[in-house]
Image (tube, rainbow, N blue to C red):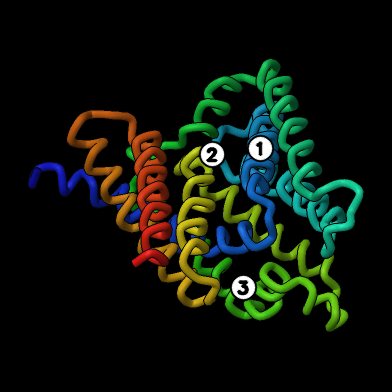
Amino acid sequence: MTELLPLMVTPFVACMVLVAMLAYLGVHVIGREVIFVDLALAQMAALGGTVALLFGFAPGAPGAYVFALGFTTAGAFIFAVTRTVDHEARVPHEAIIGVVYIVASAAVILVANQAPRGAEVIEATLVGSILWVNWASVGRLAAAFVVIGAFHWVFRHRFLTISLDPATAKREGWAIRWWDFLFYLSFGMAITLAVPVAGVLLVFTFLVVPAIVAFLFTRNTRALMLISWGTSAVASALGLLISFRFDLPTGPVIVCTFGLVLLMAGVVRRMVPAA
């Protein structure tokens, strides 16, 4: 057991850096009822990264990130202009998100078929490389998340109100689509940086599962954050431990561990009222 701990430190710290940002964004995702928006933005980022291969940029190069961010920005614009505040819209926002996801996925396959190393990019986008992350990558990711987090902290009242209480934002006369664009743009930046490290499956898990666990027990914003972060720390550590101990793929093991934690939280929530 003790020999495993040094090997777990860097992946665990990477998980905590990811969770610090993604668990917070997950509260917005659940509040807005746009569960699959991160998958759609991740696919837009993957499409940009794959298109970058056609222009000679290697995966992970600055030029590839520029392409990925450009396509993510386009996705943010689409989601901002198509979002509705009320529930009388003819087309649910989640349907638009689904269309963007499936079209971007098909486009990635088409472009990858023509691009060198296209298949490798698709595989890396799905599973990431959390097990082999190094301290330099963790440091860059943390620095970027500090900037994105500071942006959200400055405008936290606007973002949280629009996500959790859109009727009030509408009543106050805020430019909701503009603020939505800023939210989805910063969200897309976080996803663009997170996917190469953790992969789409793990990023989606970090975003959605901790927030669901938190919403089972509270609607208080501070409590939502604390429960999300605490749940993520426990599930990540347990998943890494199981992965190292039994020599299993790290990302899928962590995802399954989060699923078990969610199941246990649901059982506890059912028992609390009876108690």
Residue 177 percent location from the top left of the image: 84, 65
Residues at marks 1 and 2 touching, judged by CB atoms closer than 8 Å: yes
Image location of residue 128, percent across then percent down: 46, 36
Q: Residue at x 22, y 43 (%)?
A: 241
Q: Residue furthest top?
A: 113
Q: Residue 102 lies in what quarter of the image? A: top right
Figure label count: 3
CA gap, disc 1 to disc 2? 9 Å
Identify the image quadrant of the C terminus: bottom left
Is there any visible trace of residue 16 in the rendered image?
A: no
Q: Secondary structure at mark 2?
A: helix
Residue located beneath label 2 in the image: 200
The image's mark for residue 151 is 3
Residue sitting at the far left: 2
Whether residue 225 can be seen here: yes
How much space separates mark 3 and mark 2, taking CA atoms?
Answer: 24 Å
Residue marked by disc 1: 43
Measuring from the top left, give residue 213's x and y in whole percent: 46, 58
The disc, 3 or 1, on the residue closer to the chain's N-terminal end is 1
The secondary element bearing badge 3 is classed as: helix
Q: Amino acid at mark 2?
A: Val
> Which residue sits furthest right?
90
Give the crowd class for mark 1: few <14, some 14-19, many >=20 residues within 10 Å: many
Q: Earlier in the sequence, mark 3 or mark 2?
A: 3
Tell whether label 2 touches label 3 (CB within 8 Å). no
Three-letter amino acid code of the residue under disc 3: Phe
